[in-house]
Image: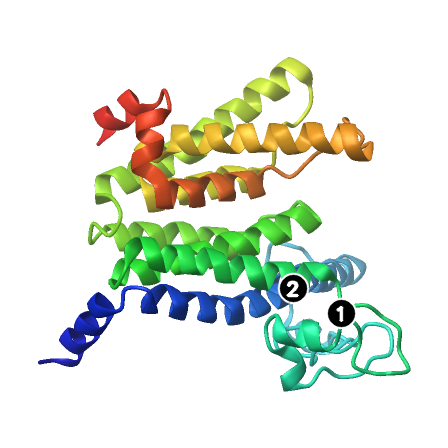
Amino acid sequence: MTYTEHYQLFFDTFPIALPILAGLFGLLVGSFLNVVAYRFPLMLEQSWIQDAKYIMQIIEAGHPLIRPRPLEFEQSLPQPEEPKITLSKPRSHCPKCKTQIKAWQNIPLVSFLILKGKCANPECDAKIPKRYFGVELVTGLMSFAVGWYFGYSLVTLAALFLTWVLIALTLIDFDTQLLPDQIVLPLLWIGIILNYFDTFVSLESAVLGAIAGYMSLWILFHLFKMLTGKEGMGFGDFKLYAALGAWLGISALPAILMIASVIGSIFGISMILMRGHNSQKPIAFGPYLAIGGWIFLLWSESINTLLPVHQFAMVMN
C-alpha cells in the first residue's frame, strides 16, 4: 500500500481524526490571523505614507511624476527612518510595557487561560483583548467543520485555505473598512486556478462567477449612488464577491448575497438599537459576504433547496 492509501485507510477507520487535526491546526492559524489582522493594515499605512513622502519629494524637486527622473535624484532620496513593519517584525510585545511575548505565551487558547487574559509582566496591568482568544477558538471550530464536511481529500486543503483567508478579511474589514487588494485579488485567481481542475465547480462557472460577482455589485453601487448621491459600499466588496464567485461558481452568488444581506441587516439593526450606533455611519459589508460565502461552502445543497434562488442555481449548473 502507498502512503496515500495508508492515510486514506486510517482516516476511513477513524473519521473523527481528520476534523480534530484540522481543528488543532486551525487554532495555530487563528493565532497567526490575529497578527495578520493587526499588522497588515499597519503595513499598508506605512507603505502609503512612504509613497506620499516620495511623491512630495518629487514635486518639491520639480521633477515630473510620470516620466523618468534623473538617477542622481533617485539615489539622493533619504531612506525611511522608521523600521519596516512586517508580519514577523518587530517581535510581538505588550503595547503598554513593551515586554516581548515568549513562544509559550503564544500557545492558542492555553496561554490566554494561563495568563488569565493579562500581560505576562507582573508589573503591567494591561489586559489581552478577548478577541484574540475568540478568533483562535472560532478559527479552530470552523477548521474542524471543514475537515468534518469534506473529509480526507485535497478539496479539504483548498476549503481550509479559503476559510482562513475569509476570517482574515473579515477581521481587517471590521477594523478598518478595508479589503486589501493584496489579499483579495490573489484569492480570486487562486479560485479560478483551482476550478480549472473542477475542484468546486467548473472553470466556466468560476469565470462567470468572478465576472458576475464584480459587475453585479458594481452596477448596484452606481445605481444607488445615482439615486441617493451616496456610496453604498466599497470597491473591495465587488472584488470579494467576485472572488467568492471564482471559488464557488456563479450559481452561488444569489444565495451568498441573500445570506450576507440578512445577517448584515440583523447586525446593523442590533447595533443601532442596542449600542446607539449612528445610522449614518457606514458598516463594513465585506464580513457578511465572507460569512455568506463560508456558509454556502459547507451547506450549498441545503441552501439551494431552501432558498428561492434554487431554480436559478439549477439552471446555471
Which residue does the numbered mark 1 point to in the structure image? 117
Q: Residue at x 38, y 56 (%)?
A: 146
Provide residue 172's location: percent of width, then percent of height: 63, 53
Q: Is residue 214 left or right of residue 193?
A: right
Q: Amino acid at mark 2?
A: Phe
Quarter of the image for the N terminus: give it. bottom left
- In the image, residue 104 sits, relative to residue 317, either above or below, namely below
- Number of other residues with Cα within 10 Å of mark 1, as a class: few under 14, some 14 to 19, many 20 or more: some
- Residue at the top extreme? 227
Q: Position of residue 213 (x, y in %)?
A: 41, 34
Q: Which residue appears at 36% of the width and 32% of the height?
A: 303
19 to 211, vertically: above or below: below
Looking at the picture, how far across and down is residue 210, in whole percent? Answer: 37, 39
Residue that mark 2 sits on = 133
Q: Check the image and report above or below for 127 versus 305.
A: below
Pointers 1 and 2 in contact (C-beta within 8 Å): yes
Instruction: Tell me if 252 is positioned left or right of 126 in this view.
Output: left
How many numbered marks have been drawn onto this rendered protein structure? 2
Residue at 17% across, 72% down: 9
Q: Quadrant of residue 279?
A: top right
Q: Position of residue 203 (x, y in %)?
A: 23, 44
Numbered disc 2: secondary structure: helix
User: Along the line of sight, which residue is nearer the eye, 314 or 13?
Assistant: 13
Is the C terminus in the top left, top right, bottom left or bottom right quadrant?
top left
Does residue 108 show up? yes
Residue at (69% x, 49% y) in the render: 176
Inspect the image, locate mark 1, and give the three-letter code of the amino acid beneath it: Gly
Q: Is 279 drawn above or below residue 299 in the view shown? A: above
Residue 45 in view: no
